[in-house]
Image (cartoon, rainbow, N blue to C red):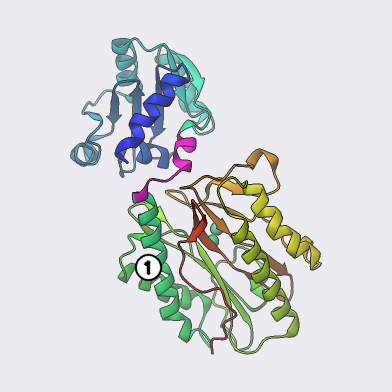
Amino acid sequence: MEQSIRRFQEMLDASGLDGAWIAAPEELSSTNLRYLSGFTGSSAHLLVTRTASYLITDFRYWDQASSECPQCEIIRSKKSVSEIVAGLVIDHRLRYLGFETEKVPVAMWKNWSAEVPVVWKPLDKMVEKLRLIKYPAEIEAIRAAARIAGESLMEVLGSVVGRKELDVALDLELAMRRRGAESLGFSTIIGSGERGALPHAHPTDRVIQAGELVTVDFGAQVNGYKSDETLTFATGPVSEELKTIWNIVAKAQAAGIAAVKPGATSRDVDTAVRTIIGDAGYGERFGHGTGHGVGLDIHENPFASQNPQQEQVLEVGMTITVEPGIYIPGLGGARLEDTLVITENGAERLTIVPKSFQIIS
Ligand code: ZN
Ligand code: ZN
């Protein structure tokens, strides 16, 4: 995003930092670096001062970086990265340099702190704060990914009974790629029958039977942005208990979606969902948070849970999923998930598959 580096520089200024080092070498992929610079390669470092930004990468990416990162000066050098940054720090007289304390490995940090003559300061998730509110282009990429994913699911839903979970996953993934997804948003989750009790069931060679619930959690990626959606559907009439569970989840999800609006907090959304599931007697069978933001990462801020440290006031332009589930070992489970963007009036669903009780035979 073109504006993001400028806004980051304003934040540096306001927090008394002279600059920031964002490390994303091969072993440390960083969506923060991509967000600030636009760089999509697999290995780079970014040094941002209040007035300039430098992207340091290797020979493989020099030309790519020049076209992807018009706001950065691309350093084409074979010196070590810490040596290059040490030189820039001296040239710019940088004294206080922020870095991502929660990400940089200890071994790397030891080298850098010995070689680069600055006072190191934690960045305190400054880039994550910037990323909370999406630009319209980011929302459009998530919307495009969600449309591709939803249309693909609807295409493959008709032919699941008698087939392996793995084969259904493959059909869905191919359909997403054919519709223009650059990759999957994340590894597809399919849990059929009693495997539906596993919140993150990896598809297996289990053959999907008639008359059970099947949970599919899936997403596509467009321009780096991901979508996230879950549907639980029936492959024919199911037991009363499974139907009951599904209905409670649907009611909880509707209450959660209704709670998503500017000024509410992410914890309010969790409370709305959790109250319904708890009142129905299934509180112990809903052990995960209610939702999360979606963007360059599949799980990013804000997080909807009862954890006060994660509580975030919702603002226009944030994304959030609402994904209650009930999981009963030995029986099965149900989860419904939509990705929403917060608007002036409440929220808009970016995911497109209807969350009504569907019997697909
Ligand atoms: Zn999901
Ligand atoms: Zn999710």
Residue 328 image-quadrant placement: bottom right
Q: Mark yes or no: residue 61 visible.
A: yes
Q: Is residue 133 magenta?
A: yes
Q: Residue at x 51, y 32 (%)?
A: 125
* Label 1 near ligand 1 (CB < 8 Å): no
- Can you give x and y, in whole percent of width and height, for residue 249 in the image? 67, 69
In the image, the segment drawn in magenta is 127-136
Q: Which residue position holds label 1?
A: 148
Decide: is 242 above or below 349.
below
Residue count near mark 1 (Cα–Cα under 10 Å), binned few <14, some 14–19, many ≥20: many
Image height check: is 257 above or below 179? above
Q: Amino acid at mark 1?
A: Ile
Quadrant of the rendered structure where residue 255 is? bottom right
- Give ligand 2's quarter of the image: bottom right
Q: Main secondary structure of the magenta part?
A: helix
Q: Position of residue 87 (x, y in %)?
A: 30, 14
Q: Pick the residue in front: 304 or 80.
A: 304
Q: At 34% from the left edge and 63% from the top edge, which residue is drawn?
A: 181
Front residue of this view, candidates 308 and 260: 260
Residue 144 placement, left or right of 268: left
